[in-house]
Image (cartoon, rainbow, N blue to C red):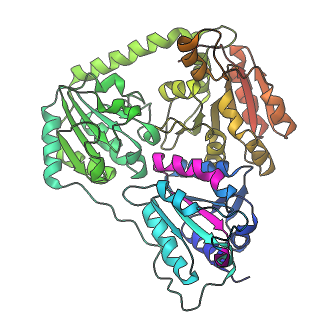
Amino acid sequence: MDTVGGWLAQYLKARGIDTLFTLTGGHIFPLLDGCLDAGVRVVDTRHEQAAAFAAEGLALRTGRPAAYLVTAGPGFANAVAGLAHASVTLAPTLCISGASPTKEDDKGAPQELEQLRVAEVYARYAKTVRRTERIPQYVENAFQHMTGPTPGPAFLEIPQDVFYKPLPQDARTDFGPRATPRSAGDPSDIEAAAALIRQAERPVVVVGSGGFWSGAGEALRQLAEQTRLPVFTRNAARGLLPDSHPQCYGGSPGLGVFKSDLVLVLGSRFNSTFYYGEFATDGKVIQVDCNSAALGDNRGIDLGICGDARLVVEQLTQTLEGYVAQDEWIAVLDGAVEKRRAKFAAGFQSETTPIHPMRLLRELNDFADADTTFCVDGGDIGVAAARHLVAEHPGSQLSNASILGALGPGLPFALGAKLAQPDDTVICLTGDGAFGFGAMEFDTAVRLDIPFICVIGNDGMWGMIERAQRPIFGEDRAVAATLGDRPYEKMVQALGGHGERVEDPDQIRPALERARESGLPACINVILEPKVTG
């Protein structure tokens, strides 16, 4: 059939979208049908939230836009968590939703919902397509907003009758695809930043998600190697400079920013995950962000540079020619790293059963190689993973550790990451509570042959909740915090995947090896010592 859905599928493919995540429904048939002719792979999940998170996982792994398709009403409502999450991680995901036919507007049609009003809260761009000839313009506008200087999700609502109509022959289609422009920093600001860095005795660089979305990895490496400036990476920027690089100090900037007299912040906000900017109180702070409104948010700064992170880093590298950070300061940071390792050494080497969570993380790090991607989900296990899991390439650590703190992205992230890079070893590390949000996506993985490894850190409870309730209400008054011992690995086996239960720390590595060799979606249920955190 010659439909708007068919045209849209072709446009998505031209825009680099070769995978569309969805859960089917009657309002969206034309686009699903169009994917067959366009060569777009349709990945149908078991829940719309999973479709949204899987698209985000693909975007976080690659740095490229991704898309998902949901039916009207409850289908859209189920996907809102993913839309909100992408607005925080800045992931360029396109949510396409069906809607009731235009002739049935405001009549109580099946699955009618005020979708646009909800989407406008979280999306960078949100439109309802009521006229078929406007769809080429709206779709390209969505891509420009998704991939612009401040990236994030976009939303298109297409009523059922519009989906079925053909695109008019005289409709304008010259809106795109087109490249997204990027802006460098003001040269005078670059000179001022370089002067502050040269004057500092204890400078550090902290790179956030903005660095990842700008593709600043190679530029960051050149800056670090030329200047020996110590670099910390956060959120989506984990792995932008590999943890194994001599100038990378990992994902815990607290090791440096509280001792520093100058912090260069690239593409990161001063929110709760970054101490609200309450550091370097006697030092200088330079903030670089492509959104001028983000500069100096939550704390005063000494210099704000509005520009693309990659371009600004390239400018700084040129301007700082001949500058090298002081050996004494590097030695201080190296000492802080060693002190931190010593603090957690007992947990990393623990032989206890149930298993210490730090031992699990050590085994995962030992198992990982340069082609491993971690997808992290959960409370206590998620916080520990953000501190201790290694990151060796851009997009190597997809995490729920944003200010939103949503549970449920882990398994869908793994779907998206594995489809993005089939040769990666993709490991989803999740708590037993978080596992429940997406457990049925193992059916998706088995059915569509998407092999990844899910490692459940199973302490039998909502640990972060239980630990907070007890001191307030009493030892025996932790309500709705117990999950118990459940054979999650058997559920995965029943669905056709590989499953193992691990109670001995020495069996973690062999179980990981067997899971990878199975070639199947795999679940390793690791029984952890309760009430112990990392």
Residue 405 vertical placement versus 448 (above, below): above
Q: Residue at x 17, y 25 (%)?
A: 282
Quarter of the image with the N terminus in it: bottom right
Give the farthest residue toward the right.
494
Q: Position of residue 301 (x, y in %)?
A: 20, 38
Q: Position of residue 472 (x, y in %)?
A: 53, 14
Residue 70 lies in the magenta-colored region: no
Residue 492 vertical placement versus 337 (above, below): below
Q: Position of residue 132 (x, y in %)?
A: 58, 81
Q: Could you tell whether 237 is left or right of 376 in the image?
A: left
Total marks placed: 0
Q: Position of residue 435 (x, y in %)?
A: 69, 33
Q: Residue at x 18, y 55 (%)?
A: 186
Q: Could you tell whether 315 is left or right of 344 in the image?
A: left
Q: Residue at x 68, y 27 (%)?
A: 432
Residue 92 lies in the magenta-colored region: yes
Stretch in magenta: 77-104
Give the farthest residue toward the bottom.
170
Front-most of residues 58 and 67 = 67
The quarter holding residue 333 reads top left
**Residue 144 in view, yes or no:** yes
Q: Residue at x 45, y 38 (%)?
A: 235
**Residue 419 in view, yes or no:** no
The quarter holding residue 261 reads top left
Residue 384 vertical placement versus 207 (above, below): above
